[in-house]
Image (tube, grey):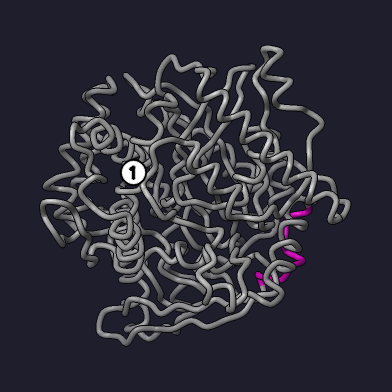
């Protein structure tokens, strides 16, 4: 959410000041976009990975503070739950050998984190949702000890006025009936169950709309071919259960506001855009402040004095509207820039799978953004949103809509249309041929085998239960095998089932 916060409670005057300050930040951003205040030498990519910690019995290990102390590395930070940590990999240009270097760096960082975790009797788990979580792990006492998390929890529940409801029906396991989850939570810790990979791309202001629209078009395909979150609270649910879980865990709306059509804070959006300003303006117009703390900086005065304004309140507010593709304004070394933050992918299953997913996204995104007749001018925004939910629910069994084709399975869409575009986009970015072939080759073989991390988890648990194991034991044994396989260097489509 951008920064640490005071632990003091907010009062109505704070909210008034915050609203005025957010609007002043928005006006300043409009001036900066109009005046050409952004420097853009070349496209840079960045990546964040959220990680789980488990103990020897495959249960969540609430030891993130000890692990971070052992690491003593600013690239790692806390996350919402005590069983989570987050890694921020340094940005780099999208060119040459940078994608391969990203894989090497990610392996090195995770190696260091694994060593630190072992000292605290913990193991890293690179997975979308930890399948051994129970309702007890959603108790508020397991929030990371940081004022911003406690405040966010309190503000979301104050806005909603009631416990959160977790309700979803899953895609059935082979030869089984669909399973249904209905549960309640008295904290926002179900959000901590959702561990993701967030892909960042720095773009020029005039290019932002095209790259964001392209990312929206790709979201459904991304989750369908990258799903890795099939189990929650013992139930087999969506192939990418993170998508509905995150929305429900952070929903500030009681049923009456949902019935009125009030927008959720976890949001796909509602229209194609023509400028990054459209997204920030929507955030300010539609969503009340959850954490109304203000900064002493006057952004207009900062801009007029030749400085890059921090736009603190606008950035903090943006951090509490969880778009699946989020706009980002940031200042690095006194220079402002803009990024598209892609948030749809789960963590894992392996480093190679993560980097392959990233290469596919960056390549296809660029090719789509630079087409003479953009794909988003040929499909409705609603179709792109429906693709997201269809891909998340059914994985490779989904039917996605694509202009000029109609309804098509994700594997066919990737192999016929998007994989060639991804090759084209990476070539245009100057990515080395060997890297392009390596990572997009993983995507191609994953689509040919139709095997994702979610598919492997579901098949493994289903087979274990047919051998007589109960669901709880099957999930623990599956996770134990998953952790071993996730570090052996083979992408998930090559993983054996009888382990």
Indicate yes or no whether the magenta region holds residue 143.
Answer: yes
In the displayed structure image, the side of residue 262 where residue 67 appears, left or right: right
Q: Nearer the viewer, residue 152 or 229?
A: 152
| Residue 457 in the image: above or below residue 104 | below
Task: Say which residue appears at 65% left-offset and 60% top-offset.
Answer: 61
Q: Secondary structure at mark 1?
A: helix
| Residue 302 in the image: above or below residue 268 | above
Residue 171 drawn at (x, y percent): 33, 76
Indicate yes or no whether the magenta region holds residue 212.
Answer: no
Q: Which residue is mark 1?
A: 357
Residue 96 drawn at (x, y percent): 32, 19
Q: Which residues are magenta?
A: 137-145
Within the image, what quadrant is residue 165 found in? bottom right
| Residue 233 in the image: above or below residue 434 | below
| Residue 401 in the image: above or below residue 261 | above
> Label 1: how many residues lie within 10 Å, few (<14), some (14-19) or many (20+)?
many
Task: Say which residue appears at 54% left-offset and 66% top-offset.
Answer: 262
């Amino acid at each position: 959410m951008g920064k640490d916060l005071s632990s003091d409670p907010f009062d109505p005057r704070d909210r008034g000041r915050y609203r005025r300050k957010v609007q002043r930040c928005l006006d300043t951003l409009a001036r900066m976009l109009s005046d050409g205040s952004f420097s853009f030498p070349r496209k840079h990519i960045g990546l964040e990975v959220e990680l789980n910690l488990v103990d020897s019995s495959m249960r969540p290990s609430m030891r993130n503070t000890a692990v971070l102390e052992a690491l003593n590395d600013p690239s790692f930070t806390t996350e919402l739950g005590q069983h989570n940590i987050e890694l921020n990999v340094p940005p780099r240009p999208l060119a040459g050998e940078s994608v391969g270097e990203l894989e090497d760096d990610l392996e090195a960082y995770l190696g260091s984190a694994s060593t630190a975790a072992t000292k605290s009797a913990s193991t890293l788990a690179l997975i979308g949702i930890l399948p051994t979580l129970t309702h007890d792990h959603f108790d508020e006492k397991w929030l990371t000890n940081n004022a911003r998390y406690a405040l966010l929890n309190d503000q979301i529940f104050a806005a909603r006025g009631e416990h959160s409801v977790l309700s979803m029906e899953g895609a059935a396991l082979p030869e089984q009936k669909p399973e249904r989850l209905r549960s309640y939570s008295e904290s926002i810790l179900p959000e901590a169950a959702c561990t993701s990979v967030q892909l960042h791309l720095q773009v020029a202001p005039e290019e932002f709309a095209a790259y964001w629209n392209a990312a929206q078009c790709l979201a459904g395909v991304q989750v369908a071919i990258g799903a890795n979150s099939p189990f929650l609270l013992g139930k087999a649910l969506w192939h990418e259960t993170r998508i509905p879980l995150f929305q429900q865990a952070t929903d500030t709306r009681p049923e009456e506001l949902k019935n009125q059509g009030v927008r959720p804070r976890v949001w796909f959006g509602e229209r194609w855009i023509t400028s990054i300003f459209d997204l920030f303006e929507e955030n300010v117009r539609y969503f009340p402040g959850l954490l109304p703390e203000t900064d002493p900086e006057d952004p207009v005065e900062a801009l007029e004095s030749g400085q890059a304004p921090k736009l603190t309140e606008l950035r903090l507010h943006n951090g509490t509207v969880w778009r699946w593709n989020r706009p980002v304004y940031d200042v690095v070394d006194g220079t402002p820039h803009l990024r598209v933050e892609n948030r749809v992918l789960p963590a894992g299953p392996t480093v190679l799978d993560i980097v392959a997913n990233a290469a596919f996204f960056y390549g296809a995104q660029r090719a789509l953004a630079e087409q003479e007749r953009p794909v988003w001018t040929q499909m409705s925004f609603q179709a792109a949103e429906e693709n997201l939910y269809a891909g998340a629910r059914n994985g490779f069994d989904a039917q996605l809509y694509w202009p000029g084709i109609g309804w098509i399975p994700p594997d066919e869409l990737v192999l016929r249309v998007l994989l060639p575009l991804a090759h084209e986009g990476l070539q245009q970015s100057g990515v080395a041929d060997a890297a392009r072939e390596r990572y997009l080759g993983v995507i191609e073989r994953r689509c040919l085998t139709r095997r994702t991390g979610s598919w492997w988890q579901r098949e493994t648990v289903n087979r274990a239960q047919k051998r007589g194991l109960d669901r709880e034991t099957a999930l623990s044994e599956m996770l134990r095998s998953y952790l071993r396989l996730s570090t052996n260097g083979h992408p998930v489509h090559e993983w054996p089932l009888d382990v």
